[in-house]
Amino acid sequence: MPAATPGTPSLLRAMNDRAALELLLTHGPLSRTRIGHLTGLSKPTASQLLARLEAVGLVVATGTDGGRPGPSAQLYAINPRAAYVGGLDVTPERVLAAVADITGTVVATHEVPYTEGADAVDQVTEALGGAVKAAGLTRTDLRRVVIGTPGAFDPQTGRLRYASHLPGWHSPTLLEELAAALPMPVEYENDVNLAAVAEQRLGAARGHEDFVLLWNEEGLGAALVLGGRLHRGWTGGAGEVGFLPVPGRPLVRQVTRANSGGYQELAGVEGLPRLAAELGVEPPDTPGTAGAPDAPHGPEVAAAVALLARAAAAPEGAQLRFLQSYATALATGLASVVAVLDPEIVVLSGAAISAGGEPLRALLEAELAELAPSRPRLVPGEVRERPVLHGALESALAATRDEVFDTSG
C-alpha cells in the first residue's frame, strides 16, 4: 500500500490509531466511549478505530466495566502478544537477559554467570535463549534486542571502548559475530545511558528534558540527556566522567590503559573501604553477598554498599564523617559536569549512591551548592531494581512500538 501523505484519510486514521494505542498503554483497558472522549473522536469513529485495531491484532477485548450504573461497556486493551522484545545487562559478573511484551510487562528473565574465558557470543545467546524459553517463545519471536554494557562501542571501529574490565568483549569482530548469531535487529548502548532511559520513561526524570544521571557501581559514570535525547558523543564516550582529572588525586595518565581516572580513584567504590578505615568506621560483620549465585554485584560494590547503608542508618560520629567525605568526593567531579551542562536535575543512581540514601543526598546537595555555579535539584533514582535491564527493554520497546503501531502502510 502506498505511504500516506499529509492530509489524506489514511494518515488521519493512522494518527488516530496511534493516539488510541498510546492511551491504552498509559491508562490500561478503556471503553469505546472513554477512548472517544480522550481522543475527541465520535462514538462511530472510535468504534471503527477499535474494530480496525482488533482486526490487525493490536488490541483485544478484555471484559466489561460492570459495577458502573447502566449497561456494562466492553473494555479494550493492547494485545500483549502483538510483539516481544529482549534486553540484556552485561557486567563483569554476569549477563542478565529479559523478555517483555509490547505493553512493557517482563514475562521472563534468565541469568548466566561470567566464567573465566567465556565467549561473549555464547554468553549472550545462552542468556537470551534461556529468557526466551522461559517465556514460551523462540528467538525469532523477538522484534528487537538492546544490549547494555559498560563503556561504548566506537561507531567508527566497532570496538568496545572505556571498558577494559569486561573480559571477552573486545574482539574487533564481536558485533559481526553477534549479528550472525542473533536473528533479530540488535542495538548496543552504554549501561549508564540505559539507566537514564529507565529513569526518563519510568522514574525520577519523567517530564524532564535536560538532566544528568550520576551512577556509581562497578564504575563511576554519568548519562547526559539534553533536549530529551541522550548525548553520546563522537565515540560514544560522553558521560565517562570517571576519567575526569580532579583535585585531591594525582593526574592519571594513559587513562584508557589504566581504565581509571582521577574522579574514579577519588569517589569510586574501590576506595570507600579505605576511606572508612581512615575515619575509624568498622566494616560490617556481613559486608555483602558477593559470590552468591544470585549476587548482583562484585565484592567491591557489595563492601561499599554495606558500609554506606550502615552509615546512612546511623549518620553520626565517624559514620557521619564518612558520609561527608564521600559526598565531598562525589561533588568534586559533579561540580564540573554541572558547570558545563547546567542541568535541571541530577538523578542519583547506582548501588553505592543509592545505599547512602537521604543523608548522603542532603550532604551532596550542600557540597555541590558550594562548588558549582548553578544548583540543580538532586533526586534519588526511582528505578532501583535492575535499572540497566529496564532501560534496555524500554529502548527496544520504543523502536518496536513505532514499527508495530504504524498502521498507515
Image (cartoon, rainbow, N blue to C red):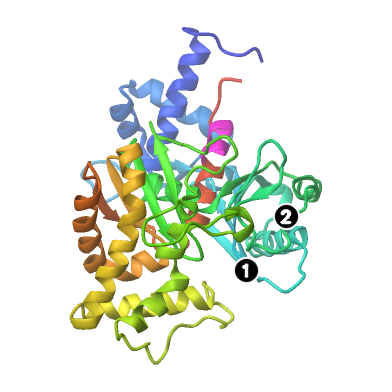
Whether residue 402 appears in magenta in the rendering, the answer is yes
Choose top left, top right, bottom left or bottom right for residue 30: top left
Identity of the residue drawn at 34% across and 82% down: 278
Identity of the residue drawn at 41% across and 31% down: 20
Above or below, comparing residue 116 to residue 213 in the picture: below
Q: Is residue 6 left or right of residue 367?
A: right
Mark 1 surroundings within 10 Å by alpha-carbon count, few (fewer than 14), some (14 through 19), many (20 or more): many
- Which amino acid, by three-letter code, is at mark 1? Arg
Whether residue 1 appears in magenta in the rendering, the answer is no
Q: Is residue 182 left or right of residue 250?
A: right
Percent position of residue 62, x then y: 44, 47
- Which amino acid, by three-letter code, is at mark 2? His
Choose top left, top right, bottom left or bottom right for residue 91: bottom right
Q: Which residues are magenta?
A: 398-404
Element carrying mark 1: strand
Q: Alpha carbon of mark 1 to alpha carbon of mark 2: how far?
A: 16 Å
Q: Which is nearer the eye, 368 or 115? A: 368
Which numbered tag is attached to residue 170? 2
> Mark 1 sits on what residue?
94
Element carrying mark 2: loop
Above or below, comparing residue 166 to residue 103 in the picture: below
Q: Quadrant of the C terminus?
A: top right
